[in-house]
Amino acid sequence: MRAAWISLLGLAFLVAQALTATAQTRPGSFADLAERISPAVVNITTATSVAGNTNPSPMVPEGSPFEDFFRDFMDRNDGPGRPRRSSALGSGFVISEDGYIVTNNHVIEGADVVNIEFFSGEELEADVVGTDPNTDIALLKVSSDEPLPYVDFGDSDTARVGDWVMAMGNPLGQGFSVSVGIVSARNRALSGTYDDYIQTDAAINRGNSGGPLFNMDGDVIGVNTAILSPNGGSIGIGFSMASNVVTRVVDQLQEYGETRRGWLGVRIQDVDEDIAESLGLEEANGALVTDVPEGPAMEAGIEAGDVIVTFDGVDVEDTRQLVRVVGNSPVGKTVRVVVFREGQTQTLSVTLGRREEAESAVPASVEQEAEPEEKDILGITVTRLNEDLREQLGVAENLNGLVVTAVDEMSEAYEKGLRAGDLITEAGQTKVQSVAELEEQIAAARDAGRRSLLLLVRREGEPRFVAIGLEDG
């Protein structure tokens, strides 16, 4: 009996130790960390010249009894047409002792004057070194007689869901403020091409924009950029642009005053299950090339209908990943691109251009006009493109194919988004300009045992692939 009690006491002791160790993973206080890194966080105030309103009573109908009142009001306030100053508040952080400061582009966009207020109360005017609207990042520079306290960037890829984080900034214009939470999610995309946001429940409000998100080592792993809120206040869903995106942008802005992203020169779309099956791909991964304008990809031999499966040694999961990997690659670098084409892979070498300078040049060609030929196929009615239809639909001179004149609303084609006015330029990765050519590709796909046919469809010039089932055709 005594031995049993001793065993129970021992077990209880071990459980207590485990609970104590778990509790100790939560910091007892964040005060030391906040005190150490606060001097590098800044408040940002901007001023912009805004032309005054030239209408003496902008909110009152002409002839209203209040018109004279509003005219007198405007005259007392310097009169109409005079320039006024508007101010905006945001946050930022110093990244070097010689005065480089990171913030959001939207905080300083269009500003005539950018003022920096430091934790010590000192104020300095900043110059804009460069901006990147794509990631909403701006780099500023102040001149100071003394070295400035600064913070370092950390590796955002090491941040895990559940890790503690600290946000600092100037919420709602109230001055320096600290909030704490955890990493709620990783790799969030909002609306930008290069989005890679860390989601956090640390309180982020208006005025926090451009401020840092710290890990518990005091390294910046994100730049607070946006919140999701029905009322403008924090509801625990905030987004910080990941530091591994920000550092690349900052390095380029610091060196060039602008961004210099790699450019492959293709239009792409995601590969879904239907498209994968129609192409003979085992998995719905990669980026499907819908168009290849003049540029690096065309020179390397990449073609519309290719599926890019590997870029510079990185397996491509979808279009978003490919765009980010390409954009992060140095301009002028020669990379190996593996494409899936006609049932097998090919490796091509592509020398990347610069995205910011990319221009699409498309050679012109004229299709000889032919008599219209119309037919119902796969739930759509198609006819050969002629000059009248080309003019009506605004189709570019270099494009040829079959015009969709009607779509059966009960068909799969309708469900997949095909509509009257669409232009089918390829079927089964082969150019089609007549109904007969389309029928040949349908027959060839069926002979090959395919359950669907891949169509390249353009609407208002924008291309996309659509896989249409053949079972009922």
Image: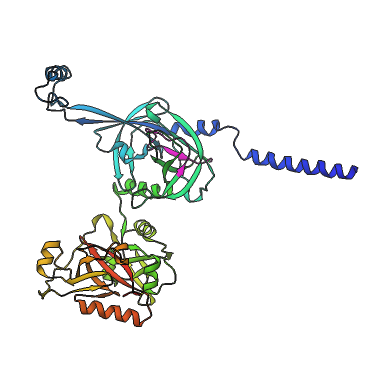
Q: Residue 241 in the image: state x and y as whole percent.
A: 40, 45
- The one of 128 and 347 positioned closer to us in this rendering: 347
**Location of residue 85 (image quadrant):** top left
Residue 84 magenta? no
Q: Name the residue rendered at 42%, 42% in the picture.
A: 239
- The one of 123 and 445 positioned closer to us in this rendering: 445
Magenta-highlighted residues: 199-216
Q: Residue 163 in the image: state x and y as whole percent.
A: 54, 44
Task: Report the side of 301 relative to 57 (left or right).
Answer: right
- The one of 435 and 248 positioned closer to us in this rendering: 435
Q: Residue 146 in the image: state x and y as whole percent.
A: 40, 31
Q: Residue 348 in the image: state x and y as whole percent.
A: 34, 72
What secondary structure is the magenta-colored segment mainly? loop
Residue 248 vertical position relative to residue 468 in the rendered view, above or below: above
**Location of residue 359 (image quadrant):** bottom left
Q: Is residue 401 visible?
A: no
Residue 209 magenta? yes
Residue 459 vertical position relative to residue 235 in the rendered view, above or below: below
Task: Report the side of 324 relative to 266 (left or right).
Answer: right
- The one of 313 and 380 positioned closer to us in this rendering: 380
Q: Name the residue rendered at 45%, 40% in the picture.
A: 213
**Which residue extends farthest right?**
1
Specify the quadrant that holds the N terminus: top right
